[in-house]
Image (cartoon, rainbow, N blue to C red):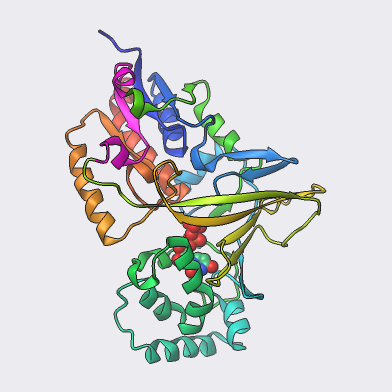
Amino acid sequence: MEKPYDYLIVGAGLYGAVFAQQAKEAGQKCLVIDKRDHIAGNIYTEKVEGIDVHCYGAHIFHTNDQKVWSYVNRFTEFNRYTNSPVANYRGEIYNLPFNMNTFNKMWGVITPEQAQARIDEQRKAACITNPKNLEEQAISLAGTDIYEKLIKGYTQKQWGRPCSELPAFIIKRLPVRLIYDNNYFNALYQGIPVEGYTKMVENLLGDTEVRLNVDYLKQKTEFDKLADKIVYTGPIDAYFGYQLGALQYRSVRFETETLDMENYQGDAVVNYTDAETPYTRIIEHKHFTFGTQPKTVISREYSAEWKPGDEPYYPVNDEKNGALYQKYKALVNAEPNVIFGGRLGEYKYYDMDQVIEEALDVAKKELTRFWCGK
Ligand code: UDP
């Protein structure tokens, strides 16, 4: 018997919405479902006092990929926001990412040569030649002072593990630059959707049918009857009923407050890099869109180990979890009608542009056969 939909897309986040958009364009009928009561997954934004609040943490769109940039611009207009967060270490303010402004404040150095000499001196003193973990990588890139004041406490709070037990690649996300440039990202294109991310996802979904408040895994048998193929963007271990054990995730909790003042901290993102402050950062949402509202909304971000019932945010890409993920991935071969995608489906620390790129690639491969006749 013919099924009512060509694709069932589980998860109305960025991956699911991009896939749905591509499938629609290829003439395929999709049903998108999500267990939350809203679309857009963790990039969901909601208006409070006229301000787009990033309800699941700050999302700043940045990419080097011209194809991805052109694609997203079909669905929303971006502003010229450039991320330039500051670090607050026990009341001392430093520019991020690590650049000449940071080095000048830290050491009083003026020239790139002086800064490099300081970093080299500290790397040598720490005897690091071949960095094996985040701690060694950080010292090797930026020196011991930067590591102690701006990386160690923050990273341990964010990941709940000592830096010596974390993979080096996490810190490589942050550029170290010997120029006076506070732009956090080395990206050609950057910005925030002027109407919020929710609107962008709404535009991607267009008139595709979306059902909210439905838990796919609880009603899997019924939902599987609705479509020939499934695109699953939830946690891969949950899909397989945790049969090989649970993958670890970091979760984040937000304490959000509306304040009766125009400007609380003068920047969208302030990181608290000491170990004692219980939160990792404070987001002041209006600065993402240069808001001039009379009030302001701030969110303190607390990081925690994920436990059942919490929202998973970050995969913990250490060796143990990497090995377990590979075992789950082997089970995927037995599910030829299911595509696993996104941060949770692929257990990967993806940025938004990478999610889009991946979804577009997978959709292209999957949907070529429908394009052929067009
Ligand atoms: N990081 C840090 N100090 C900071 C900001 C970031 O040590 O002030 C490190 C930390 O290990 C973090 C990594 O850099 O996990 C990546 O930071 P990013 O801002 O890319 O993380 P995200 O915004 O995805 O949470």
Q: Residue 128, image x and y in percent?
A: 33, 84
Q: Work out which residue is located at the far top of the displayed protein and give it.
A: 1
Residue depicted at 57% across the width and 82% down the height: 103
With 40 as the anchor, is 328 left or right in this view? left
Residue 237 picture quarter: top left
Depicted 213 relative to depicted 314: above or below:
above
User: Which residue range is magenta in the image?
Assistant: 220-242
Q: Quadrant of the C terminus?
A: top left
Q: Quadrant of the N terminus?
A: top left
Residue 153 appears in the rendering:
yes
Q: Residue 299, image x and y in percent?
A: 63, 52
Residue 174 appears in the rendering:
no
Q: Is residue 221 inside the magenta stretch?
A: yes
Q: Residue 309, image x and y in percent?
A: 43, 41
Depicted 59 relative to depicted 30: above or below:
below
Q: Is residue 231 inside the magenta stretch?
A: yes
With 263 as the anchor, is 82 left or right in this view? left
Q: Residue 286, image x and y in percent?
A: 70, 50
Residue depicted at 39% across the width and 75% down the height: 135
Residue depicted at 53% across the width and 25% down the height: 206
